[in-house]
Amino acid sequence: MKKYFQFDELGTSYRREIIGGITTFLSMAYILFVNPSILSLSDVTDFPDALRMDANAVFVATALAAALGTLIMGVVAKYPVALAPGMGLNAFFAYSVVLGMGISWQTALSGVLVSGIVLVLLTLTRIREKIIDAIPQNLKLAVGAGIGLFITFIGLKNANIVIADPATLVALGDLSNGNTLLAVFGVVITVILMVRKINGAVFIGMVITAIVGMLFSLIDAPDKVVSSVPSLAPTFGVAFTHFGEIFNMDMLVVILTFMFVDFFDTAGTLVGVANQAGIMKNNKLPRAGRALVSDSTGTVIGAILGTSSTTSYVESTAGVAAGARSGFASVVTAVLFLLALFFSPLLGVVTPAVTSPALIIVGVLMVASLGDIEWKKFEIAVPAFLTIVTMPLTSSIATGIAIGFIFYPITMMVKGKAKEIHPIMYALFFIFILYFIFLV
């Protein structure tokens, strides 16, 4: 085992890897409860129950997708990187595709499956790296920041900290409301934990918020903590049954968005974790192909099980900081996700007031990329800004990407930098123009 995971070469041990794997799990365990809440649209009261995803089935799909995806990453790519359904991608799936575009979750799952299969093929043929290189770095950063704002806005709305207003569109909610106050408390306690650099701060913040909610009778205490694993039947294999509904322009844009966000989430996370772990060699990522295939395979597995795109988690850096250096840490994290399957009764205490702080804080982390955008170059600032601001204001990640990718070639050509634009960007420009002409 030590030889396979290169313990001696990496200067690590079972103790360090186990501690690192546990730390990574605690840092991202919140997704077990946040993902079912988002995909089932639990905060949307006027949405028909018949059109919602089953929260218990999504919980199982989330845990299994995280466990299997992380295990593949650890064993095949030998990276201390954990996978799970991605934040931002799940919000796009639920709020933009299902709620906004009126596409059924079954069809949306088919779109996730197709995006995962295409990503596997693109990775195996090495086209994926070429496409990643074609997208300007500033737009990649803008997309990440825009998704962060979108997620934060969803968190604020779910907590009723921000509410609809007929005069100003949005306004501050009723801060005397018990559940809203509980969400505010959750934000404050999570911020304190984050500032103090406590491992697993987001997850611990959710636990504390849920306990306080039960103490003040805002949340019903669960009848039990451990139970048998819920049925996966409501979502398992559904992605295969709706392929006939994905052959239209709407779903093409949806699939492209799933692919695009997964593209750069994964690339950024892998490079970041590899740098921190000291794995990078000559500024190159060892076993990059294996890592990308592992990530894409995770998306395929997750779609079959019944969840949105699975991607590499930046929270893996917490495990690396705690000592993880090899894929054995990922094996440990995967085992913990499997054990989590028996804690589904806790889903009942994870209300929007409990999950909203997690969404808000994750949004804060994602907008960190704003500082790296070249704002002083106006031809860069315009498409970047429009990408970022459009996502939360239209409740659509896809629209933000489309507008940014349309304006980038325009501003660059006017600036006299047409030769700096990759042909792929011109192709995307025309695709998104057609999208607005025929579908919006």
Image (spheres, helix red, strand yellow):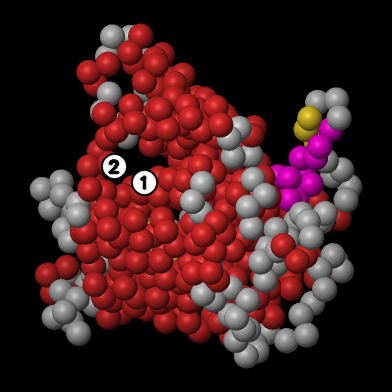
Residue indicated by mark 1:
264
Front position in the image: 55 or 158: 55
Front position in the image: 183 or 334: 334
Q: Position of residue 266 (x, y in %)?
A: 35, 53
Residue at x 58% of width, y 73% of height: 235
Q: Position of residue 271 (x, y in %)?
A: 27, 50
Residue at x 16% of width, y 58% of height: 286
The magenta region covers: 156-165
Left/right placement of residue 236 relative to residue 368 reads right
Q: Amino acid at mark 1?
A: Phe
User: Is residue 163 inside the magenta stretch?
Assistant: yes
Front position in the image: 187 or 427: 427
Q: Residues within 10 Å of mark 2 (few under 14, many from 20)?
A: some
Residue at x 20% of width, y 85% of height: 1
Residue indicated by mark 2:
132
Q: Quadrant of residue 78?
A: bottom left
Q: Amino acid at mark 2?
A: Ile
Left/right placement of residue 105 relative to residue 318 reads right
Q: Is residue 318 visible?
A: no
Does label 2 or label 1 sit earlier along the sequence?
Answer: 2
Q: Position of residue 295 (x, y in %)?
A: 34, 62
Residue at x 64% of width, y 34% of height: 394
Spatial separation of the CA atoms under disc 2 and disc 1: 7 Å
Q: Which mark is residue 85?
A: none
Q: Quadrant of the C terminus?
A: top right
Question: Disc 2, disc 1: CB below 8 Å?
Answer: yes
Left/right placement of residue 238 relative to residue 15 reads right
Count of all numbered marks drawn on residues in the image: 2
Q: Position of residue 285 (x, y in %)?
A: 19, 53
